[in-house]
Image (cartoon, rainbow, N blue to C red):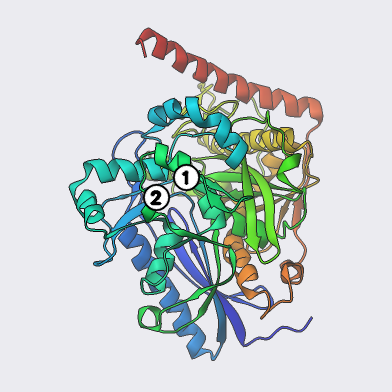
Amino acid sequence: MRYDAKKGVISIDAGTTGTRAALVMSDGSIEQQSYFPLEVQNPTPGVVEQDFAEIWNRTRDAVQDVLAHAKQKDITVVSLAIATQRSTSGLWDRETGQPLCPAMVWQDSRYADELSKLGETWNATLLERIGRTAGIRSPYYWAAQHIEKTPEVAEAFKQNKLMFGTVDTWLLWNITGGKVHGVSTTNAVAAGAYDAERSEYLLGWIEALGFPLEILPRVVPDAGDISASDKSVIGDQIPIRALIGDQHAALVGLGCLEPGDSSCIHGTGTFVDQIVGGFENVRSDRPEAVVRHVGWEDSKGLTQSVECFTATTGSALNWVCDQLEWFEDAQEISRMTEGKQPWDPAVPIFLPTLTGVRLPRVEPDIRGALGQLSLATTRTHLAQSLLQGIAQCVAMSVEANTMSTGEVPTSIRVGGGLSQSDSLLQMQADLTGIPMLRFSAADKTSLRGAAFLAGVGTLWSDLKEAVTTLGKPQIFSPQIDTEERRFWAQRWRSFLMAETNQHKYRQEEDGI
């Protein structure tokens, strides 16, 4: 294959804790990258918020940095790709372009009780139509509450100036100069009210949430001729040919294209996805935490998938480092565990469940915990326990997906920042019994995947050609036997169940 060294795709990855843009070349390499951190606010338990203005401003800055580099190097930018955190949603004024309230982040669970009550009536329909229950957060219910209770939002709605959307909607609206109010298929599905098979919103559910249908964004495929950037906004008019949820971009960026292919992406949370041949292959009695999803939608139609996740893994390590100041950063945690025997009874048990658990059942009120401490516990043991807690969550997610599809992955392709930790990937391989595959620049999988989708037809003939640029992966194979695997899994899960049962007991004592 011959690569064109003077052509590339500008790819955006707007995550929860940071936004970045990069120039992805036809050989899959990253020519340039610009990154800006983002703030996340947790004013009260269950409430997780961000500033939509900051997300756009930092994303624009990153894109302009990369575009300037491309012009300096005389590189032709053939298209623009946008991958974003999913479900995080905002409300803004169409005329001023300013957000009207803090955005609700996908980790938010403030309305879990209200949604649970609505779910008693709606869950059967939701499972049939969109493959998930009412869940613990809904952008539509959140927006409806602001329209009812926040004066600025209510006034904008009254004057027909109110705009609503997820992060991809917000970035697309801004980057096109306010010309396009759209949401990608994967992001629409993640928001919990879109039937991808029928290509339609579940309007009855949205109305039941109190959300006004007239401010819904138009759904567009994840890949194709979506729109073009406004030259006055970023400095050039570039075709926008990919708009997709970050986990789905990562699926593509890791080369997961066929049924059975599975990925594990470590970011703010950890997501385990598996491609399926069709939703008819997904069991109806699957665990509640496993949702039917869309890998992506392009000109060939829908690629379908299932997903299970843990909401706070990377963010749990950040909390340990930034708030508790036990370690300098996640890299130090990983360094301290290198070459150490992870399966040691002296290692404590850590539950990275700071915003609730999803397995074995969804319990949004459960919080993180650290147990099995002794006088023999060292700082290294603590570091090991943090990574073990994440690996245990991965193993449970893999099992849940397997229960749903009936197919055990032959390997799992890993990406995201924490995938740089050899110790973590070895723990995951040990606990799942499945080899973990790590490609080069695994922390840039969403950037690459979005670029692959946007570059089909210009840089690559199809996705299969694009993923050949990944090269060969490093493989982490299981190093413990089945009996040991069961023992360590049971030790951790027994602690999780004890914490869950203790929480239920406290609720009963308090009369909740």
* Residue found 50% across the figure and 40% down from its top: 311
Front in this rendered view, residue 85 or 469? 85
Q: Quadrant of the C terminus?
A: top left
Element type where label 2 sits in the image? helix
Kindly identify the amino acid type of the residue bearing the numbered disc 1.
Answer: Leu
Front in this rendered view, residue 505 or 240? 240
Q: What residue sits right under mark 2 in the picture?
A: 213
Q: CA distance from mark 2 to mark 1?
A: 8 Å
Residue 4 location, x and y as percent?
68, 86
Q: Is 492 rendered above or below residue 17? A: above
Numbered disc total:
2
* Residue found 60% across the figure and 42% down from its top: 337
Q: What residue sits right under mark 1 in the picture?
A: 203
Pick whichever of labels 2 and 1 is earlier in the sequence. Answer: 1
User: Cβ–Cβ below 8 Å for labels 2 and 1?
Assistant: yes
Residue 172 location, x and y as percent?
44, 67
Front in this rendered view, residue 489 or 509? 509
Element type where label 1 sits in the image? helix
